């Protein structure tokens, strides 16, 4: 019997994640950055990480998920303020 692998398409996960991110950004224009980060961690991050413990993703797919999460920090803090909040930015830690 050969080695069998399940191929997983992460595009639907990313689509739902970015929809959630955009909804939070739209409805929280005048909210503090710390509160926005908590909202993203509470609602959006779950859409990226749900079920990852039971499926095997390639290193490239994990990198794409990590980039998506880091984009949240860029949207919240912007490029100019990112250094000021660099202690928040640790990336999404996923085992390969």
Image: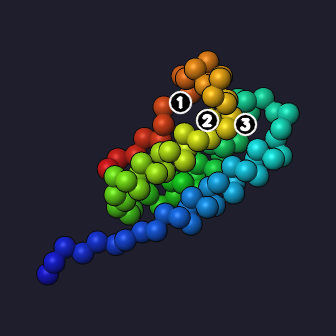
Q: Which residue is mark 1?
A: 89
- Residue at 64% x, 50% y: name it: 44
Whole-angstrom CA distance, mark 3 to mark 1, is 14 Å
Res. 38 visible in picture = no
Cβ atoms under marks 2 and 1 closer than 8 Å: yes
| Relative height, residue 42 to residue 8 (above, below) | above
User: Label 3's element?
Assistant: helix
Colouring of the image: rainbow
Question: What residue is disc 3 on?
Answer: 36
Which of the numbered marks, if any, corresponds to residue 73?
2
Q: What residue do we see at 19% from left, 73% from top?
A: 3
Q: Is residue 21 above or below residue 73?
A: below
Residue 50: image location, x then y, percent: 52, 58
Frontmost residue, 61 versus 56: 61
What SS does tag 2 mark?
Answer: helix
x, y percentage for residue 1?
Answer: 14, 81
């Amino acid at each position: 019997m050969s080695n069998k692998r399940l191929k997983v398409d992460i595009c639907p996960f990313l689509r739902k994640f970015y929809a959630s991110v955009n909804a939070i950004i739209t409805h929280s224009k005048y909210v503090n950055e710390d509160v926005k980060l908590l909202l993203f961690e509470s609602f959006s991050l779950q859409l990226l990480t749900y079920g990852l413990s039971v499926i095997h993703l390639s290193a490239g797919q994990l990198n794409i998920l990590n980039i998506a999460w880091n984009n949240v920090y860029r949207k919240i803090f912007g490029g100019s303020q990112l250094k000021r909040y660099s202690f928040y930015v640790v990336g999404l830690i996923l085992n390969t």
